Amino acid sequence: MVRINGKEIAAAGKTVAECLSDGGFDKTRVAVEINGNIVPKSRYEAAILADGDSVEIVSFVGGG
């Protein structure tokens, strides 16, 4: 299990890009952190989640 934004999800073995797609996130408008380390957008397709990982996904919201 992988903890994504505080929820346990069966996402081990998936890439960050797959998790973002599954969660309905726009990968151009988020920042992703795995176990306290920021994942560059260029690595979303290659970064694979493992059991026990802790992931934070933060969406950017425009406004003024």
Image: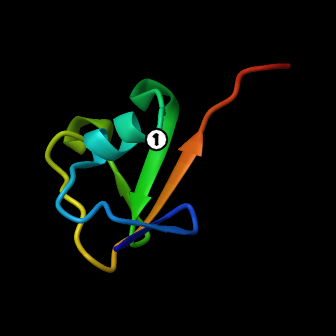
**Residue at 69% from the left image edge and 28% from the top image edge:** 61
Q: Is residue 22 left or right of residue 15?
A: right
Q: Is residue 62 left or right of residue 33?
A: right
Q: Label 1 sits on what residue type?
A: Gly
Instruction: Identify the colour scheme used.
Output: rainbow
**Residue at 17% from the left image edge and 61% from the top image edge:** 13
Q: Quadrant of residue 60?
A: top right
Residue 55 against residue 24 in the figure, above or below: below
Question: Which residue extends farthest bottom?
Answer: 52
- Residue placed most toward the observer, 31 or 15: 15
Whole-percent x and y of residue 16?
29, 48
**Which image quarter is the N terminus in?**
bottom left
**Residue at 43% from the left image edge and 58% from the top image edge:** 33
Residue ID for mark 1: 23
Whole-percent x and y of residue 22?
38, 39
Q: Is residue 18 left or right of residue 33?
A: left
Q: Secondary structure at mark 1?
A: loop
- Residue placed most toward the observer, 10 or 55: 10
**Residue at 57% from the left image edge and 46% from the top image edge:** 58
